Every structure is written in structure tokens, then in C-alpha cells.
Amino acid sequence: MKTKYIDLITQSFDFPQEEFDLVGENLHFNGIDLMKLIEEHGTPLKFTYLPKISQNIQRAKSWFNDARKKLNYQGTYNYCYCTKSSHFRHIIKEALKNDIHIETSSAYDINIVESLLNEGLMNHDQYVICNGFKREEYVENIARLINNGHRKTITVIDNYEEVELFSDAIEGDFEIGIRIASEEEPKFEFYTSRLGIGYKDIVPFYNNMVKPNERIKVKMLHFFINTGIKDNSYYWNELVKCLRVYVNLKKVCPELDSLNIGGGFPIKNSLTFEYDYAYMAEEILGQIKKFCDEEGIPVPNIFTEFGSFTVGESGGMIYKVLYQKKQNDKEYWDMIDSSFMTTLPDAWAISKRFVMLPLNRWYDTYERVLLGGLTCDSDDYYNSEQHVNAIYLPKYDSAKPLYIGFFNTGAYQDNISGFDGVHHCLIPQPKYILIDENYQVEVFYQEQDYQSVLKKLGYRLIEE
């Protein structure tokens, strides 16, 4: 009988895969010896493999540029990184190595851009696309950035009031985009996005509030789908509606020359993941070109905003199984040495699935288990794997420690959980390491200690 964990994986999936391989009994990820990391740094352990960021950017660029050549698409392609996916300097620095642009969503993003410009990591030829609902400080920061010379700043107008706010704050001429309030997927609790301006209202908005102001140039129409770029009828239907708006706006606004197709490419969330990225890039450009050719207008320059796709597949979390609890005849709980709620909040908040695999003991027999975190909260568990919502791992053995990894966790988890913050049940922030193309490791953050937590909570430390 084939009862070993490796038998389960090879019978269920194509394995090894591009980023996953088995060397002896231990799992390697993008060539990284994960058990060696554990020996050197312990667990729980968070890591980022920086080269993966550049790899994904270059992959996307090649898909869109190959499609442009094949279709003879005359517009340019511009890759933007959404900073909200991860604001860490080392993430953005790696992304900026690839001749890209930046998309922002809040006031402090502009402070980050100014810091990057000051360091020479960005230059004035790179676009800064300013998205989101803009409160006073965000408006002031955008205006300062433009007034100080970064003229390739495009403010994406989210509501009617913003035109006047920016006209008052910005000196001289400036460029804007207009965001479409797209209609959400039918499963949503609401019909139309809270962000942007309705399809039918955009041309009247331009004619009545933007066109009379000679200082404003409308550069971009911004189209965002919350569910991301998917090959389904909903996405293609929304794209066609967007193109109708673009054509109608272009006819009254000749300076309009760019279309921002926000909503990112998906990332791998299981060993069965399949997605034809090259096909989607070609199909999107093909649909746009066909529509514009029929209407007799030039095709727009294309901007994409990829956050999770840029950084998600670079990250991982490693835990040790501390203990197994048998709660009844069928349920075995493998308890990890951290918390899912604090280190992988998307798994708890939106039941997000990540790729989960053991790092060692692949030639041992396996069992069905549940995974539990350290907090006292009943929601601190993970039970969403590719094996029909069941998790199978090598059998627990107190004499043979088991380590597990969650992969492609690099987007949003730190921003949502609050890196270096005070976490649920005071579970400490794990150690965080960075890995470069030569597999050299830099310790970015040591595991959070009790002194820093108590200090954040306002306590006086007892002098030792």
C-alpha cells in the first residue's frame, strides 16, 4: 500500500513543480533549503524571497509586450505596483529595479514616494497613480509632490469634490484620471462599487466640471474589478462597458490616451492552480484594439496595477507542530507555535487559501488533521486545503518534530495584522528574514519580545 505522504502528493498532483521540489525528505522552495533556515533561525519564521518579485514583474511585462507585438498594438504598456499590498522598503526597492510605476492609495504613500525619490530609487519619469478616497492630508501630499516637480503624478478622481480640491492645491497645469464605479459581481452584497463615478455620469462630469478648467488634462480612465482579471463573462462584460465609456469620453476629450485596467492577476493558491496569463494579456489587448478600431479611435496606452501578483508569491511562513490534541474519535488537532489570526489574517478573515506543505518527513505515513493556533480564540485555526477541505500531514510523533510551511503569503498579511503591533492574545511577531538571489539571508526583524509589547501598551518595565 502507498501510505506515505509523498505517495499522497504524487498521486494527487503534478509534483515536483516550478517552485517546489523535494531534496531527500525535505521540501525546497525556489531552491531554498527550508530546513536549513529552521536550523539557523528557528520558528515561527517569516521569509521573503526577493528575486520572485522581479521574476513576476518581468513575466507580466513579457506577456503584455508579446501580445502588443502579435496584435500590432500601438499603445504602450506600463506596469504599476500597488503599494498597499506591502509597503516595506525592501519590497518596493526590489520592484523598482524593473522600470515600473507606483500606485498609491493613502496620504503616507506619498511620503514613501518622496523618500524613494530622495534616495534615487525613483525618478521623475516614473508615474505615480494616486487612487482612493482623498482626505485633506492626502490631497495636500499629492499637491506637494506635483508642486515640487513630479509632474508624472496622475490623480485618479474618485468623487466630484476632488476636482475643486486639487485645483485649489496644485500650481499650474496637472493631469488626472477618472475612476469608473464598476458594477460588482452578483455575489456581492451591493450592486455598484463605492469608489469612482458611475458609467453614465462620467461624460457629463467631464463636460460640466472638468472641461471648463483649462488647467486640467484628463490623461486616464481607470477601470477596476474587485475580483481581479478572470476569464469569465462578468469580467469581459465589465470591460466592454468600460470601453464604451472610454470611446465616448475620448470623443469629447481628445487628450485622453490611457486606460488603467486595475484588478490584478491571480496568484497560485494550491498545487492544482492553472491560469493562462499570456492568453489573458493577449485577449484583453485584442478586445480593446477591436473595439477602438471599430470606433475609429487610437488604442489607449495600457496601465496595469498588480499588487498581490507582484509580491504575493515571494513570501512564506514556517511553523513547528508543537503538540497534537485528540478531541474526539475523529478530530486530531496539530497545534502550531504561533497564531493564524496574527500571522496569516486572511486565512481567518476571508477564509483565504494558501499553499500549505510539510517541510520534512515526506516519507512517513500521513493522517488527516486540523491545524490550530496558539490564541484562546476558537477561530484561530486553518482548515482549507486542496484535499477537499481536509488537511493531510505526516503523522504526529513527539520524537520527530514536524515543520509546515505556508507559501505565497507575501501580500497584505503584514498590513492587515499590523507588523510589529500588539496582536491578539499578545502572540509575538515572528522573526522575519530576507533572501536574495544568492540565497544570502538578512535578518530584517528579530522575534518580538515582551518588553516591546508592554512598552506599546503603556506599561513601565520592571528593571532587571
Image (tube, helix red, strand yellow):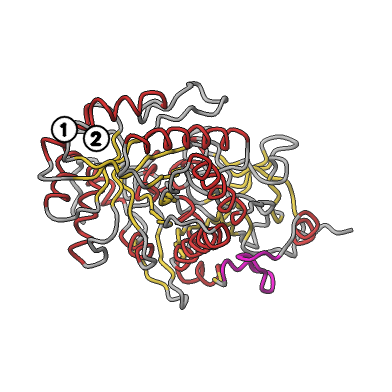
Residue at image location 48% in from the left, 65% down from the top: 58
In-front residue for pair 93/151: 151
Residue 408 can be seen in this image: yes
Badge 1 crowding class, 10 Å Cα cut-off, few under 14, some 14 to 19, many 20 or more, is some
| Residue span colored magenta | 16-30
Kindly indicate the quadrant of the structure image that contains residue 424.
Answer: top left
Residue that numbered label 2 is attached to: 134
Q: Position of residue 174 (x, y in %)?
A: 19, 45
Q: Identify the residue at the far bottom of this view.
A: 438
In-front residue for pair 290/228: 290
In the picture, measured across the screen, residue 109 lies left or right of residue 140, that is right
Residue at image location 48% in from the left, 58% down from the top: 315
Residue at image location 45% in from the left, 30% down from the top: 182
Q: Position of residue 62 (x, y in %)?
A: 52, 64
Kindly indicate the quadrant of the structure image that contains residue 221.
Answer: top left
Q: Position of residue 114 (x, y in %)?
A: 19, 56
Please name the amino acid that badge 2 sits on: Lys
Please name the amino acid that badge 1 sits on: Leu
Is 18 contained in the magenta span?
yes
SS of the residue at dot 1? Answer: helix
Of label 2 and label 1, which has the lower sequence position?
A: 2
In-front residue for pair 120/174: 174
Is 410 contained in the magenta span?
no
Q: Position of residue 339 (x, y in %)?
A: 48, 45
Residue that numbered label 1 is attached to: 165
User: How many circles with numbers are drawn on the protein?
Assistant: 2
SS of the residue at dot 2? Answer: loop
> Are discs 2 and 1 less than 8 Å apart at CB?
yes
Badge 2 crowding class, 10 Å Cα cut-off, few under 14, some 14 to 19, many 20 or more, is many
Q: Quadrant of the C terminus?
A: bottom left
Q: Above or below — where is 24 with respect to 402?
A: below
